[in-house]
Image (spheres, coloured by chain):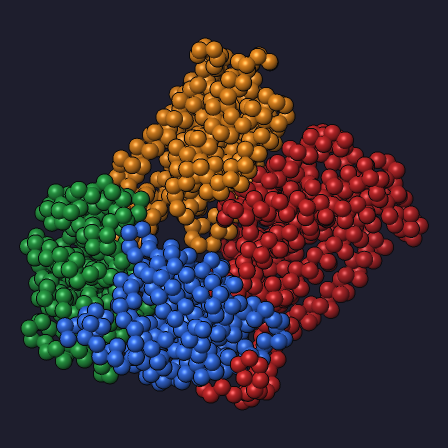
Amino acid sequence: MPPISGCMRDAPWPEDDGMSWLDTVVQGVLLGGLYALFAAGLSLVFGIMRLVNLAHGDLIVLAAYLILVLVTALGLNPFVAALVAMPIMFAAGWALQRLVLNRTLGDDILPPLLVTFGLSIVIQNALLEGFSADSRRIYAGGIETASLAIGPVNVGVMPLLTLASAVLAIVALNQLFYRTSLGRAFRATSDDPVTAGLMGIRPNRIFAQATGVAMVVVTIAALYLGTRANFDPATGPSRLIYAFEAVIIGGLGSLWGTLAGGIIIGVAQTVGAAVNPEWQILAGHVAFLAVLLARPRGLFPRAVD
Amino acid sequence: MSVDALSSFRVTTGTRASGAFALVAAALIVIAFAAPLFVSRSVIQNLFFILTMLALAQNWNLLAGYAGLVSVGQQAFVGIGAYAMFGAVILGGMDPVAAIAVGGVAAVLLAIPTAFFVFRLYGAYFAIGTWVIAEVARLVVAQWKSLGGGTGTSLPRDATRSIWGQEAVAALFGVRGPHAADIVSYWLALVLVIATIGFIYRLLRSRQGLGLAAVRDNQDAARSVGVDALRLKTLVYLAAAFGTGLVGALIYVQKARISPDAAFSVVDWTAYVIFIVVIGGIGTIEGPIVGIIVLFLLQNALSDYGSWYLLLLGLIGIAVMLFAPRGLWGFFTDRTGIELFPVRRNLIVAPGATPDKGGPHG
Amino acid sequence: MTLLQTRDLKAFYGDFQALFGIDLALAAGETVAIIGANGAGKTTLLRSVSGIIANAPEAVTLEGRPIGALAAPEVVALGIAMVPEGRKLFASLSVEENLLIGRYGRDVAGPWTLDSVYGLFPVLKERRNVPATALSGGQQQMVAIGRALMSNPRVLLCDEISLGLAPVVIRDIYAAFPRIRESGAAIVIVEQDIGQALRVAERVYCMMEGRVTLSGRPGELSREAIHAAYFGVHA
Amino acid sequence: MPILELDQVSKSFGAVPAAEAVSFAVEPGEALGIIGPNGAGKSTLFNLITGNIGVDSGRVLFGGEDVTRAPPMRRCLAGIGRTFQIPQPFQRLTVFENVLTAAMFGNRSSQAEVSGDCARILVDTGLVAHANVPAGKLTLLQRKRLELARALATGPKVLLLDEIAGGLTEAECGALVDLVRAINARGTAIVWIEHVLHALTSVVNRLVVLDFGRVIATGEPAAIMASRQVREIYLGIEV
């Protein structure tokens, strides 16, 4: 699983003066936006049905390939292609939950883990058959290299868009969760599925809609993954791990916590890379383990398990 | 129902089927040791693959099937065991076979601190936590320049030409060095599998084994009758790490070439292992044995279809987990009641007799 | 005209039989109480009617239509709302959100809206944005009743609403029942507190160990008869 | 010196108090009954004594030693045996293995040392005919007996019984009463939560009445059952 070196490519920074540390942290925060997008879907699904989908990273890569196909086959702009891909991914997530994952829910933790692990292997190898192992990239044209000067720091447009999209996605999810009837149903089902049934809620359908919504967030994450770095069928697992680390650091079931967790991982990685390029991914993991040691329930625990 | 004596009772575990199997197993072991006499070198190498994967599968099954600890990071111990062996040979000048033990010890040393981390997580989060530990181990080892860093390295020629017992076997069987080395590795794999299954079977029939099964069924009830669930699970986590480390070291003695991405590969040392256990039958000793045979047959049938093989394996794994969670062996044993490694303690009370006085309740 | 009826209703928990053929009838707008000691099968009866426990289709009928095999979401849509034992409010929802979710499966016009429920239980209005589980036991019970009313049910099933509450709080809650009855809903009250049940109900069924042991109008039943039916012969 | 003592034990879940300053003591070999309406916090009290739930404040003393912070398994080893109100057997293990687990871990001894006792307990609790049946296949009443057998197997000094007589026929109830009396006669203290009053009062020599998580009365069974206050609160009948 090669580290996503490409991702650092569009964040050149001068070597030694004080400016470089500020720049490293800013790039880290922007990278954290990408990891928060990876994590938001995971956090949403876990919050509602205590299910962790080990194929989450591979679903992001699958969505990236879907966008790639829409861009190359229909000549669409990547952002438009992502909009087109969203309903498709929603339907795919909905069907996956209704037909497969709902059967695994229950007290025993083995079925959901082993089924989603199997799903991860199936997706990776299906993509391998379909698209071979070559690295791919979604070209977004001029915007990729465009950058803005914000104060003393030089910031790429795409990383900025990524962070903005992450914040928007989390605001939207929070509005959905706390302002809509469907959001109430999500939370009620998460608290007590049996009593939710007494209110007229059908838990299996709620879980399917939740996974569908998670797949829409996955599509946004895939857009930025695909445009900012190379990807191939095997890059899914490392994305799952970053998403997982962001969710754990942020605290289970807390979407804003997930954003904070993503940013902490992002900054840890850019700082690590600044010290030694080979330590980028390692630094992220070390930050995760440090938080896990100090606050086992994450920094902003909301869901009381 | 007055409290009175039970003069004649006994506790048995064996069954007719397991008795017969014990004889068959003994014969099979003798044949297996003698195999190099009458099979080709490529068969020996296939048997080595089957035995090493079976040993990994038994260790993973001990963790997930009996202790309910679903790890997706056992590749960490395969990798650490292999690299410790490489370190002992290249830096310490040890004989590769002796260095296998160093691999096992290194795996346990890694498992102690990591247990502290991963036991703070539960269920799916424990699984991914073990995966992070494996990633950290892979990245740290990739910094170990004297063992080839990220690109990896090979065992020195003089080490691979004279591993322990190689000349004796070469002379005995009249074969060249590398063939003899394969035979020694094969025998080691055979010993390792027998030891692993023996250890697991004895553990299951012990007090700890009964405690583990109780915790698996109902942790609260188990704790209220005096079972220390965390201590038992940690014990199993360390034992599985040791076993996995030994196998990792042995695999790379035979491969003689190592790199971080290969030694810590989640597909080779965790994905295949999970499918072997799940398809064969999780939570049974016979399951992984059935599973490795199925995997080997599939591998031969689909070897030239590339990723279709893993794709199919994934689909079969999902189908089995959804529709026959106790796997092929579980399906068979549920219908026939035959168990090759029976664990159940049966109380046989002579009819009419009642227990004798004595004991704390007498 | 019988609104809700059970015919030879049986229920099992695995191999343990909880109900041995219950025949019960509820007319439109009527209030019926079911009393019985702990373990008599009262809650099992309500869980069967509300669809949490599946049964034979004709074991439960609403206006003659078999609903015994329907699941809870379908039953509430037909207008049978349940106030579950132990209240079971949703911890991550506020008081108002708990009320609103009451009508998720059946959003029909009727006497009960947020305002009319706050009218019934004024204390809830000031505390409407507080997490429901931060309220006292009595207030939580009011929210649970309000939540069921929000679906404008034709039948309101109340399971042990006096459980663990002080007598003065129980009186406050039961004081609201006349207004609930005026709104036209038929009410089934399952209660361990016999005195409270007899005051509010027009008809009473007494259950013991899964069977109906007595039924009739409160006025016509003697204390000894109730005592015997409640405790069984050896009382 | 009492074998078990609760000193001002309190516990609340959110706004709802489950136990408020509960204090009582159990002498070695005594048989104490606990009664109270549903939702009075009786089962929670047992979980506080066994350590399955932590106390908010107050102390739990066992044989004079403070076990308030001790985990459930240490309290079991100290001598607290308990049954669960809703039976929690080890489903896939056989009846004999359920009892064997409790005996081996509760007494820190080997299978050989305790097999005899386990066989005897199975005879006493009428389960010996089902010794090799997986616990998941037992009827509810047999599972209740298994709870008792398992608790006994840990060799307890205090045995906590949680509504174990519910749903029994007259004959079964009589047999259970005899068994509990025999266990108590051998020196094991009994603390018994029960709704079947005639079974409870024929064994225990003292009653504690719980309501709203508070001890509202303690004393001789006859006196307690006669008191107006207890009958009104507990039975809910204007007497």
Work out whether residue B256 or residue A204 is closer to the camera in this orientation and state it: B256
Numbered marks: total: 0
- Image x and y of residue A171, in percent: 34, 29
Work out whether residue A217 or residue B88 is closer to the camera in this orientation and state it: B88
Whether residue A68 is visible, yes or no, is: no
Q: Residue at x 69, y 34 (%)?
A: B141
Palette colour of chain B? red
Q: Residue at x 26, y 68 (%)?
A: D216
Work out whether residue A128 or residue B67 is closer to the camera in this orientation and state it: B67
Side of A147 relative to A274 (left or right): left
Side of A192 relative to B113 (left or right): left
Chain in blue in the render: D
Q: Residue at x 14, y 56 (%)?
A: C173
- Image x and y of residue B360, in percent: 55, 80
Palette colour of chain C? green
Chain in orange in the render: A
- Image x and y of residue A103, in percent: 43, 50
Please tell me whether residue B331 is drawn above or below residue B84 in the rendered image. below
Where is the N terminus of chain A found, in terms of image quarters?
top right
- Image x and y of residue A104, in percent: 45, 50
For residue A283, which quarter of the picture?
Answer: top right
Q: Residue at x 62, y 45 (%)?
A: B113
Please tell me whether residue B86 is drawn above or below residue D131 in the rendered image. above
Please tell me whether residue A86 is drawn above or below residue B214 in the rendered image. above
Whether residue C168 is visible, yes or no, is: yes
Side of C131 relative to A167 (left or right): left
Can you name the residue that lies furthest to the front here?
D1
Side of A99 relative to B104 (left or right): left
